[in-house]
Image (cartoon, rainbow, N blue to C red):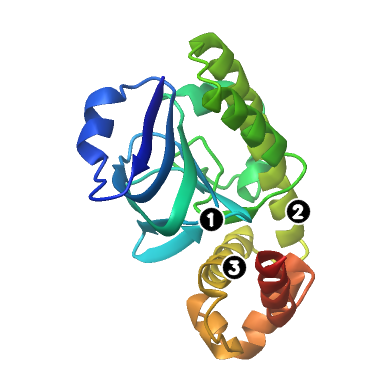
Amino acid sequence: MILRRTHELVGGDLSAGLARTVDAGNAILSLRTQVADYTLDAERLALLCAWNGRQEVAMDGRRVAVDDDTWLIVPSGPAHVRIRGAHEVQAMTILFRRGMPEEALASLVTSDDRLLENGESSYASALPFMPHLHTHDRSVTPVLLFIRRHCDMGLEDAVWYEEQFAFLLERLLMRHRQIVSRARSVPVRRAATRREILRRVLLATDFIHSNYDKPLMLGDMARAAFLSRHHFLRLFKHIHEVTPHEYLQRKRTSVAA
C-alpha cells in the first residue's frame, strides 16, 4: 500500500498514522512536504530516498542525511526520520514486508557477501546489508525511479510492487557485492578485521555525505571512522580508490551542479 502526505507545511509528525496505516505488508511512504517526522520500527528492512532536499535519519547514535545524491538502507531500526526544507522535499521510503528480503535472497546470499571465512559463524540476520548511504548508480537507481514513477501515478497493485521490490533486492545485493569486493583489497588476514575496517570507512563516508557543507578537515573525517589520520587516509583510499579530500570535493561538485 502507499501512504501519502502532500504539502505538509506545519507539524508533520507521521509516526502515529504510519503505525495505524502500515501493516506487515509492503508499503511506500511517499511525501511532498517541507516538514515531517516519523519513526521506522526495528522489524523490517527500509530504504529511503529524497529529492530537492533531505531526509535526516537518526540511528545507532549518529545522524545521516539522505539527499539527491544518495539512498539509505536501514536493515533494522529503530530510526527516527526528520524532514525540514526551505522548499518542498520529495521523499520516498520503501518498507519491505516482514520476511520478504530473507525469502527473496535466501538462495542468493553467500558467506562471501558477509565477508566470512570458512567455518566462521554467520550474523544473526540472514541479510548482509549495512546501514549506510549509497550514491545513485545505474543498477539500483533506475529501479527506484521506476517504482517512484508508478507510485506518483497512483498505482496500488500489490503484486506489481512485490515483484519490483524483489527485483530491487537483487540489485541491492549486487551493489553490496561491489562494496565487499573493494574491501577485499585491504591487506589484512582476518575477515573480522576486514569487516570492521569496512564499517569504519563507511561511517566516515556517511559523515562526508551528511556534512559536506561544513569546513571539514581530514581529522574530522578520521574521527568519524574512529581511526588515526594516517590509517584512515590509507584505508579510505583502499575502499573508495580516491582520497577523502577527493571524495569530499566530488560530493560538493555534484551538489553544486
Q: Looking at the image, can residue 245 be seen?
A: yes
SS for dot 1: loop
- What residue is pinned by disc 2? 181
Q: In this view, does 155 lie to the left or right of 183?
A: left
**In front of the other: 44 or 186:** 44
Vertical order, 1 against 140 (above or below): above
- What residue is pinned by disc 1? 132
Residue type at tag 1: His
Using the rendered view, name the quadrant where residue 240 is placed.
Answer: bottom right
Q: Mark 2 or mark 1: which comes first in sequence? A: 1
Residue for point 50% across, 35% down:
126
Residue type at tag 3: Thr
Of circles 3 and 2, which is in front? Answer: 3
Residue for point 48% across, 60% down:
65
Looking at the rendering, in which quadrant would you find the C terminus? bottom right
- What residue is pinned by disc 3? 205
Q: Residues within 10 Å of mark 3 (few under 14, many from 20)?
A: many
Vertical order, 130 against 30 (above or below): below
Between the C-alphas of marks 3 and 2, the distance is 17 Å
SS for dot 3: helix
**In front of the other: 81 or 52:** 52
Vertical order, 159 against 166 (above or below): above
Q: In this view, does 152 lie to the left or right of 189?
A: left
Image position, residue 84 (x, y; %): 37, 58
Vertical order, 233 against 127 (above or below): below
Between the C-alphas of marks 2 and 1, the distance is 17 Å
Q: Residues within 10 Å of mark 2 (few under 14, many from 20)?
A: some
Image position, residue 1 (x, y; %): 41, 19
Q: Do the residues labelled 3 and 2 touch (CB within 8 Å)?
A: no
Q: Are marks 3 and 1 in contact (CB under 8 Å)?
A: yes
Q: Residues within 10 Å of mark 1 (few under 14, many from 20)?
A: some
